[in-house]
Image (spheres, coloured by chain):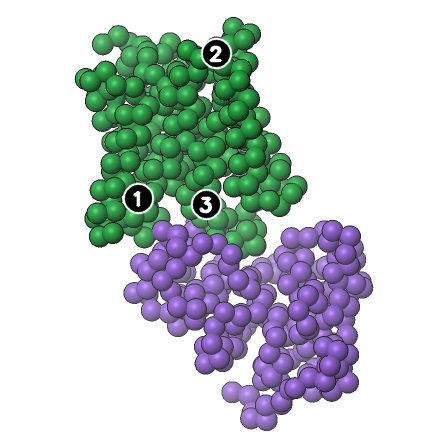
Amino acid sequence: MQPILSIRNLTVNLKHHTIISNLSFDVQPGDNLTIIGPNGSGKTVLLKTILGGFIYEGEIKIAPGIKIGYVPQKIEADLHLPINLGDFLHAKARIIGEPASEIKAVVDSVGLDKEIFNKPIGQLSGGQFQRALVAFALLGKPNLILFDEPTASIDQTGEEQIYELIHKLQKQYKLTVVLVSHDISIVYQYATKVLCLNREGVCYGTPRKTLNPEVLKKLYGVPHQYYEHKHPHK
Amino acid sequence: MALNEIFSIIIAILTAVTAGLIGAFALMKRMTLAADAISHVALPGIGIAIIFTVNPIIGAAAALLIGAILIWKLEQKTGLSTETTIGVVFTSALALGAMLTTSEELIDALFGRFQGISWPIFIIGLICATLIIWFVIKYKDELVLNLFSKDLAKATGVDTNKLDLFFILAFALTIILGLKFLGALLAGSLAIIPAAVARQLTGNLKSFLLISAIVSLVSMISGILISSRYGTELGPTVIIVAAALFFLSLLRKGV
């Protein structure tokens, strides 16, 4: 099978520091590739480089016809803007030329009530806002979605709901998912592949074969607490 | 009323609309202080133009456009916030301008004056105002995404660098339009205060832009009427009307 995304010998330098060094991996259609690694290991930079945000050496090959959606880690903007959820989603729909009917479809599929359409973005809860960002990414029918710590700003119950949502959407829309996470336990639950990143690739493969205490020690520097979910996939 | 005064009134009205629209985005971009300071850069331009007996508006326009591009470059290169860069560049410009401009011209340059304008200036003003209004309406979605998150905007295919440049140019043009009537000190205020009023009253984009433009328009028209009736200076009168509307909007919000 031809990979959707193929990365070879990727090196990214920012302000004379090497952020990512000689990284290679492939993402196959339907994969859920979860990227783990300590803070400052280059996870966010990797996603932004794939999106075209940074200059790099090496090769990033995206298969023809692939559309990428993106859910950022956090939004730095002032959330007290006089902009409601409807304005936010309509803005993207109009820019990419998607009909307004599509907005209703994506809002439904992330489980948001359309009554909150008229709510200013700043008044949404953390979980609602995160779903709104997922809906935003789904607009335009992407095949590949990059999630950067999709649960960074919500509580633990909300966190599990978001991961479940991503899993559901992946099946529903036949998406390929690349997800950055700090939560190793979710790797066992949903990931088909895992990439350990600490400037360079420390491990890459299926979670059960790849992750072990030695790898995690190499990745995080100290023995890492993790647990494996034993319950079967839904 | 003479034709050149009618020209002037039309441009004043269009200026108010552009200031309301551009100001709305400046407020959301948190560059309202910058908006105020940006108008100060006109002063050295006016001073230099007077020294070389060129039309002061041309000097002001040249200075503002150079200032706008300088800000845009600085922001890209240094990663400082717009607020800081504008604070440094434009307040030094105010000091330089005050030094260069003679005292009787300084009052006009600082506070503006309502006078008739010739038809070439009228046509140029008309074109500028139409361009700015077109820009805001056409690119409002891109501007919204950009101020939310540059990453999201880029991922949606928006050229954020270009958009930032166009915005700051549109802003400078708005100030140039307002300069004649409101002066260098107050031209920025017509962009800030109406947007602040609108912010008190609404939580969605469409009505925010609309209210901001209307408040700006009402301030300008009332300002012209009051100042022609009571002989007060136009610039300060317009801004006092706008400020009064702002305090009314606070009451409405129950502060």
Numbered tag placed on residue B30 in the rendering? 3
* Residue B202, placed above or below residue A177: above
Mark 3 residue type: Arg
Mark 2 residue type: Thr
Residue indicated by mark 2: B102
Please state the chain letter of the residue tagged with numbered disc 2 in the rendered image. Answer: B
Tell me if mark 3 has few (under 14), some (14-19) or many (20+) residues whose alpha carbon lies within 10 angstroms of its own. some
Tell me which residue sits at (72%, 77%) in the image.
A220
Q: Which chain is displayed in green in the rendered image?
A: B
User: Which label sits in the foreground, 1 or 2?
Assistant: 2
Q: Quadrant of residue A230?
A: bottom right
Q: Residue furthest left?
A: B229
Q: Position of residue A153 (x, y in %)?
A: 50, 69
Tell me which residue sits at (77%, 68%) in the image.
A200
Give the SS element for disc 2.
loop
Q: Is residue B40 left or right of residue A10?
A: left
Tell me which residue sits at (41%, 21%) in the image.
B110
> Is circle 3 on the same chain as circle 2?
yes
Q: Position of residue B148 (x, y in %)?
A: 48, 53
Q: Quadrant of residue A193?
A: bottom right
Q: Colour of chain A?
A: purple
Between B134 and B228, the one lying in front of the other is: B228
Tell me if mark 1 has few (under 14), some (14-19) or many (20+) residues whose alpha carbon lies within 10 angstroms of its own. many
Please state the chain letter of the residue tagged with numbered disc 3 in the rendered image. Answer: B
Residue indicated by mark 1: B198
